[in-house]
Each structure stands twice: as C-alpha cells, then as structure tokens.
Amino acid sequence: MEVLITGGAGFLGTRLAKALLARGTLADADGSQQPIRRLTLLDVAPPAAIDDPRVRVVTGDISDPAVIRAALTPATASIFHLAAVVSGHAEADFDLGMRINFDATRLILDCAREHGRRPRFVFTSSVAVFGGPLPQQVSDGTVATPQSSYGAQKLMGEILVTDYSRKGFIDGRALRMPTICVRPGVPNKAASSFASGIIREPLNDQPAVCPVAPETPMWVMSPRQAIEGLIHGHEIDGERLGATRTLNMPGLATTVRDMVAALDKVAGANVAARIRWEPDPVVIRIVNSWPGSFDAARASALGFVADPDFESIIRAHIEGECGR
Amino acid sequence: MEVLITGGAGFLGTRLAKALLARGTLADADGSQQPIRRLTLLDVAPPAAIDDPRVRVVTGDISDPAVIRAALTPATASIFHLAAVVSGHAEADFDLGMRINFDATRLILDCAREHGRRPRFVFTSSVAVFGGPLPQQVSDGTVATPQSSYGAQKLMGEILVTDYSRKGFIDGRALRMPTICVRPGVPNKAASSFASGIIREPLNDQPAVCPVAPETPMWVMSPRQAIEGLIHGHEIDGERLGATRTLNMPGLATTVRDMVAALDKVAGANVAARIRWEPDPVVIRIVNSWPGSFDAARASALGFVADPDFESIIRAHIEGECGR
C-alpha cells in the first residue's frame, strides 16, 4: 500500500514517517494489515534525509492542486494530513490560514474523492477549536466555538472530514490534538510555542520567555504519545466512530506552574531559573481561550491513551533529543 | 443605507423585501435607524416585479465573483444572505451544494470584508446542522453533528460568520431556522418540502403525499414569524452575541400527525383526507436526523419568538395565500 504524510518534513511528520517505516504495515480499506510499499512525504521544504527505499519526497505548496496530484495518487490508501499554518500565524495572516488550513484540506479530500479509492484519512485537528465560555472540564458533548481563525479553520476541516466520510468519499478521522510538548528545534508562531520553549531552552542552557501566567491550565501530549495516537487513529475501524469522525484526544491536564515544577525536579532549580516571565497579551488571549482539561471519554473508550505525568514527558525529551 | 438580499426572488426573500420596504428603516452600524435608500435583490432569476423605486434587481449565479461585486457595493450596510441550494438537492448534487451553500457564502463575506464597511450580515442557517444521536430536546449547548451535506455546509457557513465577525470584517449573526411552513407555491427539493405540501395542496383541492410517518416530530415556524425573526436578528446588537454569532431560533414543536389534525380542525376532514401516506426512505433518513424540539433559551432571551400553535399557522396561510 501507499501512504502519504502532508507536513512530512515537519517535526511530527518526520517522527511519524520513521514510526511507520519501523512498523512496516498499516490497515488497508478492508482492515487487513498490508506492507507499506511507498511512503510519500509532502512539504514545502524537503525533509531531512531518511535512508529508506520506500520513501518518496514531494516538495511544494499544498494549496496548489498540481502539487497535491503529484503527492496523492490513485494508489494512495492512507493519508496523514499534518500540514498546517500554526495558530499565531493564522491569526496574523487570515488569508494564508484559510488557504493552507482549510482550502488545502479540501483540495486533498477532493483529490482523494476523485481517485475513488476511499482512503483512510487522519486529520490533525486541535484543542484550539474550543473557546469562549467553557465548562471547567470540556467533554465530548461540549460545543466548539473557536476564538481564533486557526480553530475555526480546523473545525471546518473536521466537518468536511465527517461529511466526506458519510458520503463514502474517504474513511476519515479527525483527532483534536492537545498541545504537543516538548517539541524539539526552534520556537514557531504557534501561540502554544512557549509550552515547549520553557522546557527545551533551559535544558539547552538557554534562557526562555514564558508569556502566560503560571496558573495557566494546559492540556498536553508528548510527541511520542502523539505519534502513537495518530497511528492508533488510523488503525481503528471508522464505522465505530458513528455520527461524527471527530475525537477529543486524551491528554495530560497540567498548569504552566506544574510544568516548571517538573522541570525543577527533573533537571534542577538552576535549569528552571532560566525562565523569564514576560506576559504577552496576544498569546494570553489565544491560550486562555483554550480549555485546560477534558473528559475524553469517547477516545479513551476507543483505546487512545494519555501521558501519565509531565516528568515522564521531560525525561523522554531528554533521552530522545538532548543526547544525555 | 443600502441593503442586499440574496435569494431575493425566492419566497422568503420576496416577503422580506416587502417587509423591509414597508418598514422603511434598518439599524446602521452605529445602531441608529436609517432610511433604506436602495434594496438590491440578487437571485438566479428576476423576482416578481415590486413597484418601488428603491428596488434594484441583480440577476446571476451567486458563486460568480462578478455577480457578487455587482450586487454588493461599498455602500451596502446590511446583507440578508438567504440564497441556498436546499437539503435534498445538496445531498443529490454534492458539488453544487458546496459551491452555492458554502463557496458563495465565503465570496459574499470576502467581498464585504474587501469593502471594509463591516456590514450587518444575517445568515439563514438551519436546524439541519443537527443530526445523529440527539437529546430529547436540543439546547444551545448541543453539539451540531450534521448528517446531510446541506447541514455540513450551513455549519461551516456559521463558523465563517462568527470568525469574520470576531475579526471585525462583518457584524454577523447566523440564525438556525426551523422548517418554514406553510410555504406557498410548488414543492421544492428540500427534504422538508412535504411539511408545506401536506397543508398547501389539500387546501388547494389537490392531493398531497406525505413521505414520513405521522409520529415524526417537526420544529416549525410560519413564514410571517420567519420574516420577523430575520429582521429582529438584524436589529439586535451583535456585541450581545458573545463567543458565537449562531442562534437556535425558537420554533413550534409539533408532529406530522398534529399538523394534519390541525388541518382537519381548520379546514375539515375531507381536506385532510387528500393526504396519501407513502414512506420515502431517502426523505425519512434526512428528516429523522433533525431534532424535533429545542430549548432555544438564548434566542428567546434576545427577544426572538415562536408561533403559538399550528392552527394559527394554517389560518395565516389561508388568509395570506388562498384568498379566502
């Protein structure tokens, strides 16, 4: 079978690619495990080289139909759609957000529909679809009223995924991911970028700025757990999802204060002391519109799992990224 | 001020136009009542002539940007966006539904944004955004999981209306209308078309087919109440709507059986006897996915009202349409 990852050069895309290549198989339309013969990584820039004959790289703008057609062929049985313009960027550039987060999603869905193969389609949505007045704990029965354009675009993408699945064009599943933390690399324009920065930079002996208050609630997931969640999301039988293909992923409910306390405990007070607290109203407005805690009952019943605690997330980051 | 009605040749559009012309004013951006100097009616076909110098007619496909630009000018202060492909039609022709119900809505919003006047924008959404397993009574806190492409397209339109309002591009309000009944004229491709047909046709001495079971719950609103709701929706202060610009309109909870019983009572058993019961699985699937009863608390608190009973709806139809 052939598999496509959009955003395949990104941090999650690259990890997902490696995990899929190591795993070797995925469920085909009929549910049987089939060997992955070709894995296409699509992104604006080429990914760091992965030495595997199954890997094919397509570079280009995902809002360009010709690029989509080059990456998504009639043989593509599975699509992981990870490419997106992040929250802060989509808020600053509305048109770019609409084009990449919504129009490109629709292009991919329409290309898949045209091929008629009804591929499995895993869409990474986000906790950012929620906003406005929210209950203490968000549940599967909480209405999503996004307060950012990123959230609005992801929510519209979810609706397409469910309707295209209902019509039999694809076999979709839209996973509302918690804030992924700790991301390696450099800060990005996501409003949640600080959540990784305040752990990653101090561990690299660098200063970090925290733009939100210590008591800010956070709903997080480690990269490792996110990859497992995406693969599990692909493997489950779509028929089990019923009237909506959207799922709130389980996550770890914490606060910025508790994240820093965990860093203190794992790496020492001198490390945590590298964080400067400088409130940024723009980031605060977006982050505070997101819920900090969920009852992700539906996804849990379907076998999705959360990280046990934040210390283990930091330790996994140190093992995987800091080479210690 | 200038006002635009899309779907201005349709049944609701024509009635709304007459009501606005009779009323003479609407709230401008600052909330002050301003005289309506020009009322543009946009539709695929010209409306029945309305003899009023304020009326301007634009004919064309609303998914054509040139048509939108001809109808929506920098002076347009208010937009009532009624044009749509109805539920049964959008289900049968997916691409047409996406183009008219979603893409055209976005075109209008983008044209308004370009003009920079931040017009009031009244979007007619629908009870059809709901579907799947629902509580006995749907409330403002019920998640919309549409089970028709029409519902999905309307739900995406609502999300745009809220996000464009949040960004300050427009001052929108999206009203989820109950099934409008009794519509005059001929049947259309709406799955709910029978709800008007089983009243209208027998009153015109014609036979009617009811494709759903008598116990089918219905959430209805008379044309008269719908027009009042659209105007009230325009007049309320958008700031009062908060995190979402979407409102579940109050309606009348009834059943097909009770609708027929009301017809029997108002017009006699010989009239109601003209209904033939012929179940249609396609219509049943769509109609049964809609909720039959709502607690429309938020809209009620904002001053929207429902019809008191179905007999008065039939009587108003007879007075207004049957010339008796």
Image (spheres, coloured by chain):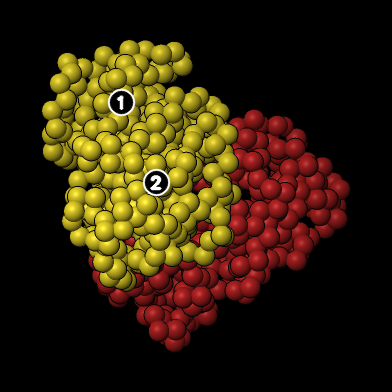
Chain colours: A red, B yellow
Q: Is residue A73 above or below residue B24?
A: below
Relative side of B67 to A42, left or right: left
Camera sees residue B308: yes
Q: Residue B5: horizontal and vertical position, in percent?
A: 27, 31
Which amino acid type is marked by label 2? Glu
Q: Earlier in the sequence, mark 1 or mark 2?
A: 1
- Where residue A185 appears, as percent x and y from the top left, is 59, 52
Q: Of residues B114 and B56, which is closer to you in this image?
A: B56
Q: Quadrant of the N terminus of chain B?
A: top left
Picture coordinates of residue B157 (x, y %)? 38, 44
Residue at 41% x, 13% y is: B33
* Tag 2 secondary structure: helix
Residue topped by disc 1: B19
Tell me the residue that label 2 is attached to: B311
The disc numbered 2 marks a residue on which chain? B
Query: Along the line of sight, which residue is nearer the eye, B320 or A179?
Result: B320
Q: Nearer the viewer, residue B45 or B29?
A: B45
| Mark linked to residue B144 | none
Above or below: residue A198 compared with residue B231: below
B3 above or below A286? above
* Residue B54 vertical position relative to residue A45 in the rendered view, above or below: above
The answer for which chain carries disc 1 is B
A120 relative position to A221: left or right = left
Q: How busy is the neighbourhood of tag 1: few (under 14 within 10 Å), some, or many (20 plus)?
A: some
Which tag is nearer the camera, tag 1 or tag 2?
Answer: 2
Q: Is residue A320 visible?
A: no
